[in-house]
Image (cartoon, rainbow, N blue to C red):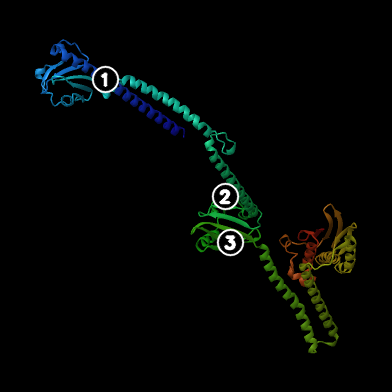
């Protein structure tokens, strides 16, 4: 902008200088020409009077180098000329000033030399005898005058250019400085030209509008990132070249990567199935893929993003469907187990009843068969009661909590199981202190009973079971430790599943429904507790519950 202002000022100054110079030369030239013309007329009048009185003698005696005097008769023949021989001169009757003087008494004309460097002014007057006296003077034309003044004119012109350049430079900087000093962050605080006030006001309004839009955009962006960062589902955004634009923490954990933004997804996940899923999404608009990873099941959905009819990227959603898959598997296993557990005692009952009905049982064996029918029916009732109990726990249908002495309740349950422990040649005892908690007495009863019952069932002859009740800063703690067969580590995460048995071949020997620990888990969860299992094969098991 400074250069433009400088050029504008400099060109304007140059134009003014040339105009002034031309005007001055023209005015001076015409002024002095007029003066010279007046003097020439005076010379003509004086000469005409002298010729009238003295005739040609005056002309021959006159010494006048300032102008040229020519005397012509009425026919145009030159009688006298102060600079040339009259006899060699052509007839002047057709000369403009002569012809005019012969007609009107006076005549004037101006003629240029062939080179246009000299201009001659002619003034003529008719005398009383009909002859014409002409006086002329020559002077330099404007081009010749300028040529003669070339050196001083150039010097003046050069000095004027230098001065104009200096002034234009200073003036342009002075004009631009307030503009360069404008604080556009605070437009209304500037002390600049009054003409800029509307512009600065408009800029201020625009900046406020932009700031509001930027804040709104940042807020929405922050909301978006807050949402995707706290999503349990993984989210990955890819551009049209499959480079990662955005990836949330859940997706980062799934792909087990860091600083993935900008990388090609195939570089992060080198999988043929992933490549096929992306190709299918690009071709069909969407695709899905199931992946098993780190003991979890995932469902991946890829959807094509289009803008103006062209593909602009792909969005990938990653869902952890482990619970759904496990729930479906547990449902299938539960259905199969319930069917098996119900059919086994029913078949036994029906078999024994059929033998009795057909009289195929000896009289002395009838009590044994009837006892078998009763035992299997009791087992069936217990199984159904446990299933109903689990359903009630799933639905949360429990009475209001009350204060329960966990130590006293444990003593009662251990006393109730001592006979069973003696039959298995297992010792059982309770240690600890009286600890009162707020809970559901029936649930606490089932927790202690099932843990102790399992500890006795899966113990070894001469083994022991110890129930420990204590109070810590974290809450009330109940632990049941046995010296039994133990649980392999790969089974410890599943022992609380319904009907799950570590060794199915011993299920008939130990009895039970396979739902005891599942009832314990649901009861502990209902009361907000936690379960911890420590066990190893042939080293016993210690189950600790913290309320």
User: Mark 2: few, some, or many residues within 10 Å (few <14, many ≥20)?
Assistant: some
3D distance between C-alphas at marks 2 and 1: 97 Å
Outermost residue, front side: 128
**Residue 48 point in image, percent of width and height:** 18, 16
Q: Quadrant of residue 25?
A: top left
Say which element carries label 1: helix
Residue at image coords 55%, 49%: 262
Is residue 332 or residue 241 the one in the foreground? Answer: 241
**Residue 200 point in image, percent of width and height:** 55, 39
Q: Are marks 2 and 1 in contact (CB under 8 Å)?
A: no
Q: Which of the marked residues, 3 or 1, is nearer the chain's N terminus? A: 1
Query: Residue 272, can we see it?
Result: no
Outermost residue, left side: 87
Q: Is residue 257 above or below residue 502?
A: above
Q: Which of the marked residues, 2 or 3, is nearer the chain's N terminus? A: 2
Q: Which residue is mark 1?
A: 38
- Please name which of the two marks, 3 or 1, marks the residue nearer to the observer: 1
User: Mark 3: few, some, or many residues within 10 Å (few <14, many ≥20)?
Assistant: some
- Please name which of the two marks, 2 or 1, marks the residue nearer to the observer: 1
């Amino acid at each position: 902008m400074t250069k433009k202002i400088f050029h504008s000022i400099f060109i304007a100054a140059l134009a003014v200088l040339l105009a002034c110079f031309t005007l001055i030369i023209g005015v001076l030239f015409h002024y002095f020409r007029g003066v010279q013309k007046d003097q020439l007329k005076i010379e003509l009048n004086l000469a005409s009077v002298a010729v009238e009185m003295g005739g040609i003698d005056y002309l021959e005696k006159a010494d006048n180098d300032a102008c040229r005097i020519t005397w012509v008769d009425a026919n145009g023949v030159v009688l006298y000329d102060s600079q040339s021989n009259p006899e060699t001169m052509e007839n002047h009757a057709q000369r403009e000033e002569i012809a005019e003087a012969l007609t009107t008494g006076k005549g004037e004309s101006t003629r240029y030399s062939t080179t246009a460097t000299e201009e001659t002014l002619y003034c003529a007057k008719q005398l009383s005898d009909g002859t014409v006296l002409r006086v002329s003077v020559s002077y330099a034309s404007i081009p010749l005058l300028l040529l003669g003044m070339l050196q001083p004119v150039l010097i003046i012109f050069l000095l004027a250019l230098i001065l104009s350049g200096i002034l234009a430079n200073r003036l342009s900087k002075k004009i631009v400085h307030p503009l360069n000093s404008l604080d556009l962050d605070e437009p209304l605080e500037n002390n600049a030209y009054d003409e800029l006030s509307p512009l600065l006001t408009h800029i201020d309004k625009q900046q406020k509008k932009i700031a509001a839009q930027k804040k709104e955009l940042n807020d929405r962006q922050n909301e978006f990132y807050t949402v995707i960062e706290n999503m349990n589902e993984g989210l990955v955004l890819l551009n049209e070249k499959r480079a990662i634009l955005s990836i949330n923490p859940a997706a980062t954990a799934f792909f087990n990567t860091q600083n993935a933004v900008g990388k090609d997804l195939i570089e992060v996940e080198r999988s043929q199935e992933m490549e096929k899923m992306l190709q299918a999404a690009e071709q069909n608009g969407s695709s899905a893929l199931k992946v098993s990873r780190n003991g979890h099941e995932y469902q991946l959905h890829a959807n094509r993003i289009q803008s103006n009819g062209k593909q602009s990227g792909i969005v990938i959603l990653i869902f952890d469907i482990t619970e759904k898959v496990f729930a479906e598997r547990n449902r299938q296993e539960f259905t199969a187990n319930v069917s098996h557990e119900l059919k086994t005692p029913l078949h036994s009952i029906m078999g024994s009843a059929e033998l009795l009905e057909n009289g195929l049982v000896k009289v002395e064996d009838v009590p044994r068969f009837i006892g078998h029918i009763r035992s299997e029916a009791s087992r069936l009732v217990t199984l159904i009661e446990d299933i109903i109990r689990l359903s009630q726990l799933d639905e949360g249908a429990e009475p209001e909590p009350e204060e329960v002495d966990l130590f006293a309740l444990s003593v009662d349950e251990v006393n109730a199981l001592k006979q069973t422990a003696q039959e298995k040649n297992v010792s059982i005892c309770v240690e600890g202190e009286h600890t009162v908690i707020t809970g559901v007495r029936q649930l606490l009863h089932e927790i202690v009973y099932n843990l102790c019952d399992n500890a006795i069932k899966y113990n070894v002859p001469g083994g022991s079971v110890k129930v420990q009740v204590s109070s810590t800063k974290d809450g009330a703690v109940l632990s049941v430790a046995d010296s039994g067969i133990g649980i392999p580590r790969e089974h410890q995460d599943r022992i609380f599943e319904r009907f799950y048995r570590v060794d199915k071949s011993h299920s008939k020997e130990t009895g039970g429904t396979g739902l005891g620990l599942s009832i314990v888990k649901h009861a502990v969860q209902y009361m907000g507790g936690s379960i911890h299992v420590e066990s190893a094969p042939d080293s016993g098991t210690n189950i600790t519950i913290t309320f």
